[in-house]
Amino acid sequence: MSRGFALLLALLFTALLSPVVRAADREFTTSDGIHLHYIEQGHGHTIVLVPGWTMPAWIWDAQIADFARHYRVIAFDPRAQGDSEASRDGYEPLRRGQDIAELIATLGPERVLLAGWSLGVLDALAYVHTHGDARLAGLVLIDNSVGEEPAPTAGPRHAGSARPIGREARMRLFVHGMFARPQPAAYLDRLTAACLRTPEAAADALLNYPEPRSFWKEAVYATARPVLYVVTPRFAGQAENLRRHHPTAEAVVMTGVGHALFVDDPARFDALLGDFIRRRVWP
């Protein structure tokens, strides 16, 4: 038997003996009686991923697959998103932050790395504002304002802000507009259908959080945990100010990507996040 063939057999044998931890669908019931869904994969320290406006947990599929090799990854469906139940109310920051708190409590006593994208940034900061950072090992905020200066300039009109065309067509335009790089048509169709699952009244309420910019800034500066702020150039000024003034924050501006930057360039995003985790969160 050749040495190369023996090595191949040894590797195959090791792979067969290694446990394969597949993604599992989980749910918990909130204190106001709503069933919320999340995806769980991997084992070890826990990373909690919170998606943006109307988005499903599976938009993090690349990150789930990558980080579940070394960590326990939780991708959350906020209420009325993905496979979570819709409720009559609760589409405001304090309830959304409470939902995150109850999810974290469900996961066990260990501190978690909490990562929020887009509206998930505000939901994560609402959690910190109300519950503090005692249960956090770190905080990752992806492509939304954190209340720093300068205030963001107006971007393209949001899918929920005008009604010249039908809701499905508006949502399709919104979904397509999140990416700078071509995505498969089937993927965009699936994502659009998932976003349309959020009832229109709930989606509209989520676009109208009443808190002032100072609410979010107070929250991000209240934490002493390591903070990673990853943004597109629209938030470059805020990123620089947060990096300069927050004693535990790092900031990275990614170019050549759209708002869903971790989908457009998962390799680069995952490398940034992995490096941050290894250096600052769980060395």
Image (tube, grey):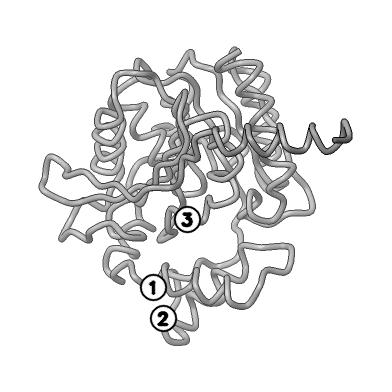
Distance between mark 1 and mark 3 Cα atoms: 15 Å
Q: Residue at label 2?
A: 167
Q: Residue at label 3?
A: 58
Q: Residue at label 1?
A: 196
Residue in the picture at 38% in, 73% down: 196
Distance between mark 2 and mark 1 Cα atoms: 8 Å
Q: Callout 1: 10 Å neighbours few (<14), some, many (20+)?
A: some
**Image quadrant assignment for residue 32:** top left
* SS at badge 3: helix
Distance between mark 2 and mark 3 Cα atoms: 22 Å
* SS at badge 2: helix
Position above or below: 169 against 76: below
Query: Where is residue 245 shown, x and y percent of the image?
Result: 62, 18
Mark 1 or mark 3: which comes first in sequence?
3
Mark 2 or mark 1: which comes first in sequence?
2
Residue with the most extreme bottom position: 165
Q: In the image, which is nearer the foreground, mark 2 or mark 1?
A: 1
Position above or below: 63 against 178: above
Task: Verify CB contact (< 8 Å) between mark 2 and mark 1.
Answer: yes
Is 103 left, or right, of 221 in this rendering?
A: left
Query: Where is residue 225 shown, x and y percent of the image?
Result: 49, 16
Query: Where is residue 31 shown, x and y percent of the image?
Result: 12, 40
Position above or below: 13 against 171: above
* SS at badge 1: helix
Q: Label 1 sits on what residue type?
A: Leu
Residue in the picture at 41% in, 68% down: 194
